[in-house]
Amino acid sequence: MKFPPETLMAYADGELDAETRRAVEAEMAADPQVAQEVERHRAMRAEVSGAFAGVLDEQVPDRLLHAAKKSATSTVQPRRQWSWPEWTSVAASLLIGILAGRAILQPESESRLVVAGTDGRVVAGGALAQALSEQLSSQDGTDVDIGLSFRTRSGEYCRTFGARAANPVVGFACRDAETWRIDMLSTAPRAESGGSYRMASTQLPAPIVQAIAERMQGEALDADEEAIARQRRWRD
Amino acid sequence: MSQVEQVRRQVVELLPRLRRFARTIARNVHDADDLVQLAIERALLKHDQWRPELKFDGWMFGIMRNAWIDEVRSRARRDRIFAPEEAGVTVGHDGSESNVRLLTVQRAVAELPEEQRLAVGLVLVEGLSYKEAAEVLEVPIGTLTSRLARGRETLQALLSDRPGERS
């Protein structure tokens, strides 16, 4: 046989240039074994393709249509879908809690992770502020995990986080002068059963994912870019 | 139309094929649809990485392949310890002779080593060119070709052992 087996396969898959194709065809005409080999490849292709063709006629599950239209969280099971009204009511109740001076995450006020800043802004405090400034996404923190870091269209650095606490929270914060302004915060989606709680950007509730997608400029920072940004204290 | 809306629209159009490709990667319908869902979410999150000059199906298949490697694969493996599944028994199931053969082929694909399975899924099932498939898998075209050739050989061996009946 003149051609290596992979060339005959490529012929059957329509991958050869015109010249090689003609040469293979000449060989097929001259040698029935070659023709048979090509036919075997074609039959295999048709059979494998046919075995999965039926999937195209199946009804697409609603959850997938929903995911495409709404975006969603990506913890595979269970999937908690958040609507905006739900989110805003969570945010409002948290804010009320903060403004009333109640400890949100920790009973001891000095270790509070979320505090009311000046001008009514909500900023990171304690271990959360520390982690946002110092911890790389690749590092495992004691109290806080950092998911991903990214820049917004206006050039701010933002980072997603998850805080382990009695009631774990997730969200993202953006660098604002010397503080980390918390732009979105929510109770954490339920951790995967059996696994320890580990924050990942993909486990954020849908509205947060969507807000990040709308604000992110380009891609999330990679490890090197993140290290450089940290060195510059998350400023230009 | 904004970029994210364009991506959404194309995702919806591509859903049947996304499910089909997922079915060649994952070994049961449930894992396959979880994989599709995860890929959709990832695609929407990084929608601005898509460029109109990229073929949308290849871009999505690449995201799906990475999602499989990162997340679903390990979960699928873990779940199987508790609930062993009949591989590949997924499409059409009325017990007729032609359906038995379909299931035999699906099951043979499910038994392929992962690298061969992905090459077979992209080229033979999804009809991508070798070049496009190599890009999705982030390998040189020669690597893709040899995985595909080995995949076909393995299938041939599996299927000639059991021409009609599932063993």
Image (cartoon, coloured by chain):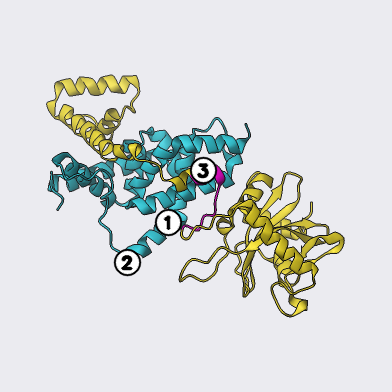
Chain colours: A yellow, B cyan
Residue A143 coordinates in the image, percent (x, y) = 64, 73
Q: Amino acid at mark 1?
A: Val
> Which of the two discs, 2 and 1, labels the residue nearer the N terminus?
1
Name the residue rendered at 65%, 44% in the picture.
A218
Which label sits on residue B81? Answer: 2
Mark 3: few/some/many CA within 10 Å (<14, 14-19, 20+)? many
Q: Amino acid at mark 2?
A: Ile
- Of residues B117 and A205, the one nearer the viewer is A205
Residue hosting label 3: A68
Residue A189 coordinates in the image, percent (x, y) = 56, 63
Name the residue rendered at 72%, 70% in the picture.
A113
Which label sits on residue B72? Answer: 1
Q: Residue furthest right?
A: A119
Residue A114: name its quadrant.
bottom right
- Of residues B61 and A10, the one nearer the viewer is B61
- Of residues B166 and A166, the one nearer the viewer is A166
